[in-house]
Amino acid sequence: MTTGTLTAAGRTRFRLPRKQIPVLATLALLLVMYGIGVSQYTAFSNVQVIFNVFIDNGFLLVVAVGMTFVILTGGIDLSVGSVVAMTAMVSAALLQDGMPAALVLVIALLIGPTLGLLMGCVIHFFEIQPFIVTLAGMFFARGMCTFISGASIPITDGFWTSMSQERIGDPRGNFVSISVLIAFVVVVIAAYTLAYTRLGRNVYAIGGNPQSALLMGLPVGRTRIAVYTISGLCSAIGGILLSFYTLSGAPLIAVGMELDVIAAVVIGGTVLTGGAGYVFGTVLGVLVLGVIQTLITFDGSLNSWWTKIVIGGLLFAFILLQRLIGIRYK
Amino acid sequence: MTDSRPVLTMTGISKSFPGVRALHDVNFRLFPGEVHALMGENGAGKSTLIKVLTGVYDTDQGAITLDGEPVSFTGPMQATAAGVSTVYQEVNLCTNLSVAENIFIGREPRVFGAVRWGEVRRRARALLASLDLDLDVSAPLGSYSLAIQQMVAIARAIDIKARVLILDEPTSSLDAGEVAQLFRIMRQLRDEGIAILFVTHFLDQVYEISDRITVLRNGGLVGEYLTTELPQLSLVEKMIGKELDVLEGIEEHSRRDLAALEEGTPLVAVSNFGRAGAVEPFSLTIHAGEVVGLAGLLGSGRTEVARLLFGADRTDGGQVAIDGTASSLRTPAQAIDHGVGFCSENRRAEGIVADLSVRENMILAMQAARGWLRPIPRRRQDELVDKYVKALNIRPADPEVPVRNLSGGNQQKVLLARWLITEPRLLILDEPTRGIDIGAKTEIQKLVTQLSDGGMAVLFISAELEEVLRLSHKVAVMRDRQMVAQLANDESLDADRIMQTIASGSHREEADR
C-alpha cells in the first residue's frame, strides 16, 4: 500500500487554520467597533483615543497575560483581582511608612508570585480543583487588603508620582504612560515564552491532554505550578501599574476584575478548556473591552453598565463560536 | 535471528499485589530484529510484565538485563532514555499540537532555550519519511485519523534510538487497511534490528506478523514458541489452559433458517433513517430472535446506525414502526421505553461509571427506566446482580467492587448485564468484544446466541467479520456511511464475500452517476 492512498483514505478531515479563527474573529470585531467609533464621532479617529485605551487598561492587559497561561493549561485563577488590590495596598502602606521605593517594589513583586506558587502547589500536590483553590486565594488576598487598612491610602512617593506622570509621546502630542511600555514588555516576553520555550510548549501540551503529557515525560506538575506563579507575578505587576495609575491603594479596588480578565482572555480566542490560544489574542480581547468602554463614554448618554451588557453578549457569542468550529477536535 | 544474543532478558520475575500474585517466576527474552508476541488472557499478567519492564512497578524478585547489563528502571522516562519505548493502546499524544511537535516535545532542538521550529519540522518530516509517511507536520495531530496518530506515536518512540519497542494492543482500534500499514512499519523496524514486543488479542495478527510467541497464563509462564511451530489451536489452548470446543457449538446457530424468523411482524422496522454528515438514509428490519450483524470498516458508519436506532442522534427523516405500529425513536428515553438497549463501543467514556460498584453500574439503566423517584429495593437489586454476575461469570464475583478494578472483559460484561436487567427486546451491541481476551469473547458470543434463542433481537456490530458471520442471521454491510447491502447469512456467505461487498460498494455508487 502506498503512503498516498493511506493519507487519503485515512479520513483526513477538512482543514482550515481553525486555531486562528477565534483570534481573527476578535480582530474583525475590534476593527468593526473602531470603524463604528470613527464614523460616529469625529474625535474618535484621534490616535490618542487608542493610546488612552492602552493607558486605562495596561494593568488589565498584564493580568490577562498571566491568566492566558493558566487558562491554556485548562485551569483558572480567580485570585488575580484580589492580588492586584493587595499588591497596591501593600505598596501604599509600606511607602506611607517611609520605606524606600526600590525595596517596596521588590516586596510587592514577591507577594503575588509567592501566593501563586502556594496555590499551584496545593492544586498539583493535593489534586484540588483550581477553581476552589484560587477562590480561597481570592478571599485571603482581599481579606489582607482590609487587614492592612480599612480605608484608601494615598501614595505621595516621588518615584510613584513620577512614574504616574511620565508621558512618552510623539511630536504631535500623542503619548502613552510608562505602564503601557511595561505592559508591552510583558506581552512580548509572554508571547515568546509560549511560542519558543519548553515551558510554553508544555503549557499547551497539558491543556491538550494532561494524561498524555505525563506519559510523554513532560514535567506536568512543575509546569502547572509555574503557570499559577506566573499568573501571580503578572497580578503583582498589574497591582503596581494600578497603583501608578491611581496613586493609592484601596481595599475595594479591582473587585470582580478577575471576571473581566477571564472575559478578555476568552474573547481573545483562548479556549477555556485549554490547549489553544495566543497572547496576541488576549491583547485583542483587552482592546475589545477597552474600545467598548470608550464607545460608551463617547456616547455620553449610556449608563456605564452597558459595558457589562455588551461584554456579556460578546462572551456568549465567542464561546458559541469556539463550540461551533469545534476547537477541541477529540 | 535465533543465533544472536538477546537484547533484553527478564529472568525469574515475580510480582505480587496485596492478595494477588500477578507474576510468578516468569522468564522472557527478546532478540534484536524480531517481533515477539506476548499472549495471554486478560489478567494473565501481560500488562504487569510490561509495567515491570518499563519501571512502572518494582519487581519482587527477578532480574532484567538490557544488552547483557543488569538494569532496573525507575519509570517509563528512564526506560525510554535507555532505549525501551512503549506505545500504548490509547494514543497518548496531544491532539491540539502539531504532528512535528508531538514527535519532539520534551526534547526539541533548541538554541539558547528557544525551540528551533524549522529544525523540528525538518527532522519530523525526515523521520516520517523514513516510515514512508507523508504528512503535513504542521497540521494539528487531531486532524489525522487514529491510525496515523498511532504511527506518529511510534515515530516519537523510535526517534529516541529505541532498541526495544513495546506495542501494547496497538491495533485494537484500527481497521484492516490501517493494520496493514502498521505492520509494514513494524516489519521495516524489525528489519532495521529493533526488537518489537507486540501485545494483541487478534490471533490472526499474531500469525501474520510475529516471529516468536510467549504465552502467559494466570501470572505464570506457559512457554516460548516459534510462531511457525505453534498451530493457532494449540496457542488458544495454551492461553486458556483447556481444550476449546465451545466455538463449534456457536457455529451451527447462525445457519438456522432466516425465513422462519422473518415471518410475522418485525420488531423494529425503520425506513429512510439517516443523518446528514453521519450516515446516508437506510432501511432495516429486525425481527424478534434475530441477530443482525453490522459489518464494515472503521468509520464506515456502523456506530452512527446504532446511535440513530437508539435515539442518541436524531434522524433527519424516515419512519419507524415498532411491532408494526408507527412510532418514533427520537431520544434514548423513548428507545428505552420501546425496549431498546445500547451497549456503547466506547465503554470507558459512554458506558461504565468507573467509581461506582458493579452493582450500581448494573442497576443504572433499570433505575433510569423506572424513574428516579421509585428506587429499586435493595433485596431486588442484590437478586438481579447476583443472577447476572453468575450468568455472565463476572470476576471477581463481588458486586461491591468498584468497576475500575475489573479487567476490560469483565467491565464489558457488567455493561451487558446493565442492559440485560432491563430485559430489552432489541439489544444493540457495538463492538462488545473489542480489546477483551478470547475466553471472555467466547462467553459473550455464547450469550448473544442464548439471548437470541430466547427471543431477543440483537444488532451486533463488530470489525471482526468472522465473529459477525458466526453469530448473525443477516449481515448488513456498511461502506462510506452507506448501508450498501443486506445479506442473508446462508452457506454462500463468507468473509470474502463481505469483503467484496465492502470493496465493490463504490463501483455501484459510480455506476449510479
Image: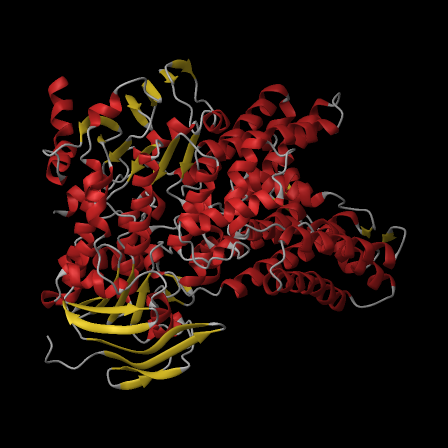
The residue sitting at the top extreme is B326
Q: Residue furthest right?
A: A150
The tally of labels here is: 0
What residue is shown at x 62% (from left), y 60% (from top)? Answer: A123
Quarter of the image containing the N terminus of chain B? bottom left
Query: Is residue B215 positioned above or below B484 on the image?
Result: below
B235 or B279: nearer the viewer = B235
The reply to whether residue A212 is visible in this rendering is yes
Using residue B64 as the reference point, say whether residue A135 is left or right of it: right
- A131 is higher (above) or lower (below) than A48: below
Residue A285 point in image, percent of width and height? 57, 39
Q: What is the x, y in percent for residue A162?
A: 75, 55
Q: How is the image coloured?
A: secondary structure
Q: Residue furthest bottom?
A: B69
Which of these two is toward me, A78 or B381?
B381
Q: Residue at x 76, y 25 (%)?
A: A303
The quarter of the picture where the C terminus of chain B appears is top left
Within the image, what quadrant is residue B71 found in?
Answer: bottom left
Residue A77, relative to residue A289: is it above or below?
below
From the top left corner, tell me how far across and down residue B307 is, in percent.
39, 31
Q: Is residue A164 left or right of residue B350?
A: right
Q: Residue at x 32, y 66 (%)?
A: B46
Say whether residue B73 is visible. no
**In front: A282, or B242?**
B242
Residue B109 placement: quadrant:
bottom left
**Residue B110 in the image, given as x and y percentages of width and height:** 37, 65
